[in-house]
Amino acid sequence: MTTPAHRLPAAAPDVGIGWRHPHHAALLEQQPALDFIEVHSENFFTPGGAALAVLREGRERYPVSLHGVGLSLGSAVGIDPWHLDQLARLVQAIDPVRVSDHASFARGPSAHAADLLPVPMSHAALDAMCGNVGRAQDRLRRPIAVENLSAYVQWADAEMDEPTFLNMLSQRTGCQLLVDVNNLYVNALNAQLRGETGDPLDRCRHWLDAIAPTYVGEMHLAGHVHCGDIVIDDHGSRVVDAVWALYRHAVQRFGALPTLIEWDTDLPDLGVLLDEASRARSVAQQALAPEELVA
């Protein structure tokens, strides 16, 4: 029997890291103190083989969160039955602590865009996403979490803002919301680059305050990159100070929810991710502490 990894005190907010291939061996060997690890679901769809064996080994040591990029929950043509079947098989094999995907679409009648594209914030789009989320939850026999998107294009026919859309999605389907704090900041910076006025941090705080706390089940933190005329959510660097400030606000709004450090490009040593996870735990604890203890 494999010895379980050291777990952190229950009083601390659950904090995990994205477990990517270059860190598979190091994490299994070092077994650092983490509350969970997260993997991208689609990387483990192949039955059997080395990848699934490694994931099973990780699951013996840590709770696992499955985070997908391919369900295409916003597609008007519905969910790909094959994709949902593979996800259901993986969920049954791993028994993850959470399953999540994005409030996006990638699938059309005859093509898959292989990208996370934003849906129009319209009633028709909401109906389509509610139907797809419902089918996914029925097939998986559990609620899923739906993440807000870093969106680089805008639809002209929006009928509501994003918090209203996501609140209604959760209310109608029983799904949870996964609040990606970095995505909020990236969208606010890009809005500023398009000429919108106002403080990007205030824009993000207003968004967070508009989300019903009872619907939120997890938060994500990551880095981004400025490319001159656009800001990209590349998950390739440390979390910036502005996002840490927004995370503190989010914790005060939503409570000590499971929080993930995402890092997918230009991967550093495992210790850097662990340092970011430690900071997330510290920021959350400070945000929840009584003011007299913080002072």
Image: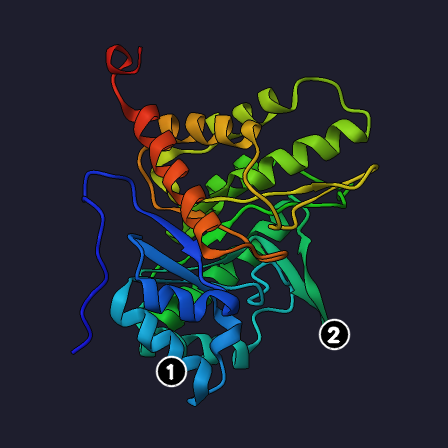
Image spot of residue 260 (x, y percent): 43, 48
Image spot of residue 14 (x, y percent): 30, 46
Q: Quadrant of residue 203?
A: top right
Q: Nearer the viewer, residue 24 or 15?
A: 24
Q: Does the image show residue 160?
A: no
- Determine crowd level at label 2: few under 14, some 14-19, many 20+ residues with C-alpha closer than 10 A: few
Is 183 located above or below residue 132 in the figure?
A: above
What residue is rendered at 34% in x and 68% in y?
Answer: 28
Q: Nearer the viewer, mark 2 or mark 1?
A: 1
Image spot of residue 193 (x, y percent): 79, 30
| Left-right relation of 284 to 9 | right
Is 181 located above or below residue 294 in the figure?
A: below
Mark 1 lies on a secondary structure that is helix
Q: Quarter holding the C terminus?
A: top left
Q: Look at the image and name its color scheme.
A: rainbow
Q: Nearer the viewer, residue 15 or 46?
A: 15
Q: Nearer the viewer, residue 63 or 278?
A: 278
Is 290 located above or below residue 178 in the figure?
A: above
- Look at label 2 and name its amino acid: Ala
Real-space CA distance between mark 2 and mark 1, rounded to the nearest whole angstrom: 32 Å
- Look at label 1 and name its amino acid: Ala
Q: Earlier in the sequence, mark 2 or mark 1?
A: 1
Is 148 located above or below residue 267 in the figure?
A: above
Disc 1: which residue: 53
Q: Quarter holding the N terminus?
A: bottom left
Image spot of residue 284 (x, y percent): 35, 32
What residue is rendered at 64% in x and 69% in y?
Answer: 77
Disc 2: which residue: 111
Q: Does the image show residue 101?
A: yes
Mark 2 lies on a secondary structure that is loop
